[in-house]
Amino acid sequence: MSATLTKYLALFALAASAFSTGAALAENTLSYNIGAVSDYRYRGLSQTNLKPTAQAGLDYAHSSGLYVGTWASGIKWLKDSSVELDIYGGYKGEITKGLGYDLGVLRYQYPGTSAANTTELYGALTYGMLTAKYSQSTTNLFGTVNSKGSGYLDLSATIDLGNGLSLVPHVGRQMVKNSSDFSYNDYALSLTKDFGKGLSGTVSYVNVSKNLVSSLTSSKDMGPARLVAGVKYTF
């Protein structure tokens, strides 16, 4: 685990302790999580050169539907940064009974370099087990030149198998504006187990439609098909 990521994990723990009084209020919820994955995949692409890493997050939610949070993970795909730090906020609610929505903004920060920093706006609809989400960048997308306005469509389902098990099929389409050669599809099939008391585990099969290499890294292939495992504990 890198020293930079260790520092962020410590900050998360301190923040959770500092806000614990607010979390006790009935209309507020404060939680934090820590975990590890065998390979950090984002939109099908490896962010860690197919290596394991640690991750942690802190989330605040209000009963009105407002939420904010931050999340960090070790990465290896950038030459000048070893940490991804996400900051996000939004609002969740229901349009009609059973039809939920989620609107928000997400900022990806990479301490040590600004080349890949990205901001996206997103909106999602959930009906029963089905979720459709669309994200659009308001900046260049992860360092791709002249790519402002790129979009990502995410379609998934969460199928309850009972006994704490869920099966989650997913398909996504990354559309990179003015760089169609970088556009691709990603696919995943995940099995998640809720062990209770905040502990969960996931095994996923992940694949993408083409080999991709970022201009900011020396990785030869960021998305080979493989199984990825992860474990997370939420406090």
Image (spheres, rainbow, N blue to C red):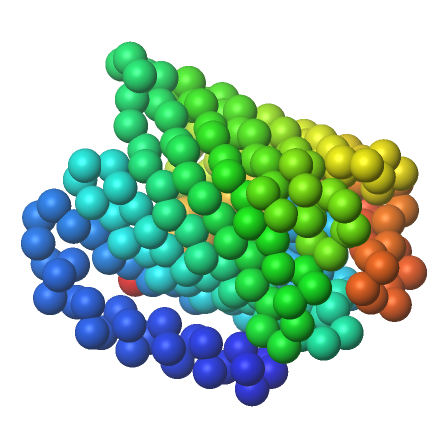
Residue, x 47% and y 28% (percent of image)? 124
Q: Is residue 162 above or below residue 60?
A: above
In the picture, the quarter occupied by the N terminus is bottom right
In this picture, residue 132 sits left or right of residue 153: left
Q: Nearer the viewer, residue 9 or 164?
A: 9
Extreme residue toward the front, this view: 146
In this picture, residue 26 sits left or right of residue 211: left
Image location (x, y in percent) of residue 164: 41, 40
Q: Nearer the viewer, residue 207 or 215?
A: 215
Image location (x, y in percent) of residue 217: 82, 66
Image location (x, y in percent) of residue 209: 84, 36
In this picture, residue 224 sits left or right of residue 172: right
Extreme residue toward the top, this view: 96
Q: Is residue 225 visible?
A: yes
Residue, x 86% and y 49% (percent of image)? 212
Extreme residue toward the left, this view: 25
**Count of numbered badges drawn on the protein:** 0
Residue, x 84% and y 39% (percent of image)? 179
Image location (x, y in percent) of residue 11: 37, 77
Q: Is residue 64 above or below residue 99?
A: below
Q: Residue 9, located in which quarter of the rendered image? A: bottom left
